[in-house]
Amino acid sequence: MEIGSSVGNVAKDLGLEVKQLSDRAVRIASRGRTQYFALNFKSGHLITTERIDREQICGALEECSLNCEVIVEDKMKLYRVEIEITDINDNAPSFQREEIELKVSETTTPGSRFPLSDAHDSDLGINSLQSYQLSNNRHFSLDVQTGTDGVKYAELVLEKSLDREEQAVHDLVLTATDGGDLVRSGTAQIRVVVLDANDNPPVFSEPIYKVNVLENVPKGSTILTVKSTDPDQGINKQVIYSFKKITDKASKIFRLDSNTGDVTIVGNLDFEEASLYEIEVQAHDGGGLFGRSKIVIVVSDVNDNAPEIALRSLISSIPEDSPLGTVIALLDVQDLDSGENGEVTCSLPIDLPFQLKKPFENYYSLVTDRALDREQVAAYNITVTATDNGTLPLSTAITISLQILDTNDNAPFFDKIPYTGYVTENNPRGVSVFSLRASDPDWGENARVTYSINEADRSEVPLSSSISVNSETGCRLRMGVPHLSAVMSPSLSLYWIRMTTARTSYTPPFRWLTPLLSDGSTGVELAPRSSEPGYLVTKVVAVDADSGQNAWLSYQLLKATEPGLFSVGLHSGEIRTARSFVDKDALKQSLVVLVKDNGQPPLSATATVTVVVADSIPEILSDLSSLSASADPQSSLTLYLVIAVASVSCLFFTFILVLLALRLRRWRNSQLFDSSSVTFSGVPVSQFVGLDGVRAFLHSYSHEGSLTTDSRKSQFNFPKSNYANTVTSQQTCEIKNPILVTEELNISYEDQTSFQVRL
């Protein structure tokens, strides 16, 4: 078959969709040095990539086949494929020697037989050698016999006595033909030389010589010696040895000494290539008589091939929370040796959280055996060692690199508990109290820590009114606006604060590759009314920043104007028509496509595709204009909305002007009051302190005081806060001692960080 010829429909046989072949990462793997087949992703057919010669691959075997595997990587499935190679009549019969010389004594009696060199045809069955023919002559005929092994032997039969004086040389033509449709043939020239009498042929000492040889025997070694005897005298007694029937491969490995009969090794023996050789040897004397025997050489295997490891599939990274038994790699392990030398055992280092499983012969899967923790080990170099069971075992090792992806499995923690800080009661706003920091052993966004203050239920004054912390860095706790304020009631001498940490879990969003409009749709696509079912309208493509199975995406049609009119490829994202268009179908079709990944839990995103059913651009414009004209009754609603927004805006600006006027009047009155009065009275002041973008309301405090020359009779009135920015009651006390008493309180809570503030 020519290169590129189709062998079979693999996609149909395995139930695979042709349009999904490339997305599912389907590929062909075969053993051997030559890749004879490949997969056509467009048609799903298995095609030839090299010219196939059955005789070169299988030799004389009647059944010849090649094996390969179809690997579906996303499902981690393997299918074995066997291709039978059938024979054609592409080889003609041929003789090992094109010229055959026979020396026949003139005293040879009629009926004597002379074996001829056999023709060889590499084809099988009817295409192989079928018959011999001999050219016309008066003295010889041809007798063809079939041996027990099915091989045809041709013998020259003397029909009439020879007379050297009448004719000393007879030239004959031997023709061998096969049985193919186009008959092929080969010829050899037979030259019969008539000699004087020689009535005893050579006889071998053994009818069959058998010897066992190790495949690593060195070159030049003599493995066998054949012997023959001849009772004749003189030149008729001298014997010469030669190979009568030997293959081309064997002729490059073995050599026969024509005088001594020694068989030596001149090439390399390889048990994996051939374990048995059968050679026919002959001895002929000077009188032209022949003796024949057979040599059987059995090659024994030695452990000369190390195991071979082929990585058929690999996942380079997995999340640290992957379940036990997650498949990381699929290995194909082979050893060309036989018996115990070809039995292979695979192993891993004992300290790794992985194990090898054997789903079927020669294949191993590398799976997780224990829970993974990226914070302890972020990457593994896994060494897989394959060792055979030979007397001197050979081994092969490969290293697989595996990255462990981080998951948010660790809570943040503070570097110490508790934190203690001191601050004076009259400190300026914005002063830093102390620094604090929390750590998270996770990586990337999973290790990003935010900070917040957890107010205790026993706090009489909301801490958010006086204390703030940077939610991102958390480096310093500050007083005052916009951080920690020291404006607190003098009756309080200590704050107690619980700091909590919160972490944001980052998930990479989907990103649509198709051009998106501002409204999230992919624009308008055209579908002709004459489209047949399966017509490709457009294709939506999305990518996921994750890797591995977390980035395996699948598409589905979430919503459609006409259900059943369109379909979406599960893995390709191709939008095709599911049926033909009919008159009742709407001109404008809106499709909502959902894409989701294969992670746990799965994440998803949507895109809207608008499909207009028309055969040409002018038709689209006319149809769309008619659709837009029908939308005029909605224009009045827009006018009402504009009027409503303008009215609200006018009211808002009026409110701002009135509020500004009241503020100016209050400020003027306060200036006049301050210039004419010597008695202090508190004026409520509302303030807001920023805490991470949230405006926290600060309570107002009013104080009244009367001062005398005698400090022991001075009085202060302290209002009690009601958390509503109003003073509901007052408490008057005499200051007998102007020295404040310092108090300290240390408060801590479980799983919280606390600190002290002393006034």
Image: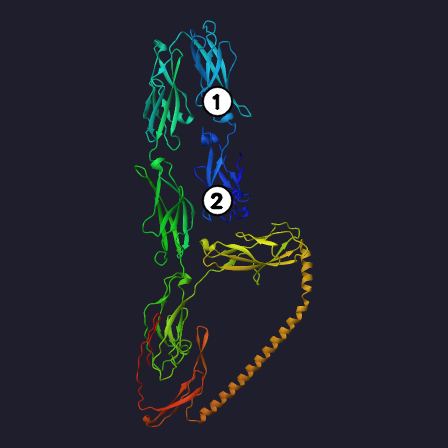
Residue 626 against residue 654 in the figure, above or below:
above
Residue at image point 45% right, 86% down: 726
Q: Position of residue 268 (x, y in %)?
A: 36, 30
Residue at image point 47% right, 49% down: 75
Residue 572 against residue 105 in the figure, above or below:
below
**Residue 514 in view (yes/no):** no
Q: Position of residue 310 (x, y in %)?
A: 40, 43
Residue most extreme to the top = 165
Label 1 Cα crowd, 10 Å radius (few <14 / some 14-19 / many 20+): many
Q: Which residue is mark 2?
A: 27
Which of the numbered marks, if any, corresponds to residue 94?
A: 1
Q: Give the secondary structure at mark 1.
A: strand
In which quadrant will I find the C terminus?
Answer: bottom left
Disc 2 to disc 1, C-alpha distance: 42 Å
Q: Amino acid at mark 1?
A: Ser
Q: Position of residue 519 (x, y in %)?
A: 57, 63
Between 344 and 51, the residue placed more toward the observer is 344
**Residue 698 in view (yes/no):** yes
Which image quarter: residue 685? bottom left
